[in-house]
Image (cartoon, rainbow, N blue to C red):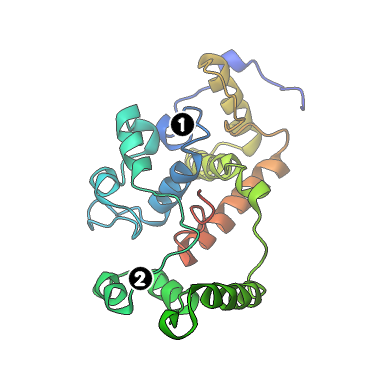
Amino acid sequence: MKKLKTDLKSIDLKWLPPVEEWDFRSVTEAECRVACHWEYERENHPLAAAQKYFPPNYRQAAQELFPQPWTTLTKEQRQKVLATFLPSPVLQVHKLREFFKRMPLNGAHPAILQGLLHHSYVVIPNFRMHGVEAVIKEFEKWARKAAKQYPPSRRAQAAEPPFDALKWLAVARLDKARRKANVTIERARETVIAYRQANGQVDENSVLPIYASDGAWSKAKTDSHLCQEKVRSNPSILLAELA
């Protein structure tokens, strides 16, 4: 890392935004996906509280707490939010009548409806005429053929929680504050290091936004904006591989 030109103890930390907006060291691996999704939704909807907005896939416990910063939530509150995100099932089978009863037609987010239209199927098994074994065999044949339309499961990648995305978001929020305070990127990087020295909490997931160069800082800011756009176009992208 480039040698600092200034004494870190002399650096002014006052321009830094509230720590709950960018210091994500308290986020655990188990909650990282939900916390990351939560924070990017806060970024995309800054007036969420005033407009009574909450992300479409959040249930009651999450709705009651959004859009509070994730790191301000207690351990118990975080657990309640995590409990609202159930593992994605391998297969769902419903009678068509029950499916339409459950379908959120009124006020549903367009992304949810589009997902149902493009990725749901009507299965009509003829048990009476052909029996269960013939139906299973035919269903397997269809499933193998239909699966070719989708990319293969990426479980190894899914296991990696998106701490990088949280780190990028921290940079984007810090960069907004440093421009408002007329602070250079180099001084902003020094300030984060000085903050770390003054606040010695362990950073076991390397989520504190410390970068070795101005270029790396700028790239992280760009990556944050790209991630933000992806979440805006597909609100569930950070949760898609939650299992």
- x and y percent of residue 218 in the render? 65, 46
Q: Is residue 149 left or right of residue 177?
A: right
57 relative position to 106: left or right: right
Q: Residue at x 47, y 27 (%)?
A: 26
Residue 79 percent across, percent down from the top left: 35, 35
Rendered location of residue 170, percent (x, y) = 52, 40
Q: Secondary structure at mark 1?
A: loop
Looking at the picture, tell me which residue is in the foreground, 141 or 192.
141
Task: Give neighbour class at mark 2: few <14, some 14-19, many 20+ (Cα, 10 Å).
Answer: few
In this rendering, is residue 238 above or below 99? above
What residue would you read off at disc 2? 94
- Residue 70, picture quadrant: top left
Q: Nearer the viewer, residue 228 or 36?
A: 36
Dot 1: within a 10 Å radius of its alpha carbon, few (fewer than 14), some, or many (20 or more) residues? some
Residue type at numbered disc 1: Trp
Q: In the figure, residue 225 lies in which quadrant?
A: bottom right
Q: Nearer the viewer, mark 2 or mark 1?
A: 2
Outermost residue toward the bottom? Answer: 129
In this view, the residue in front, 157 or 145, is 145
Q: What is the three-letter code of the residue carrying label 2?
A: His
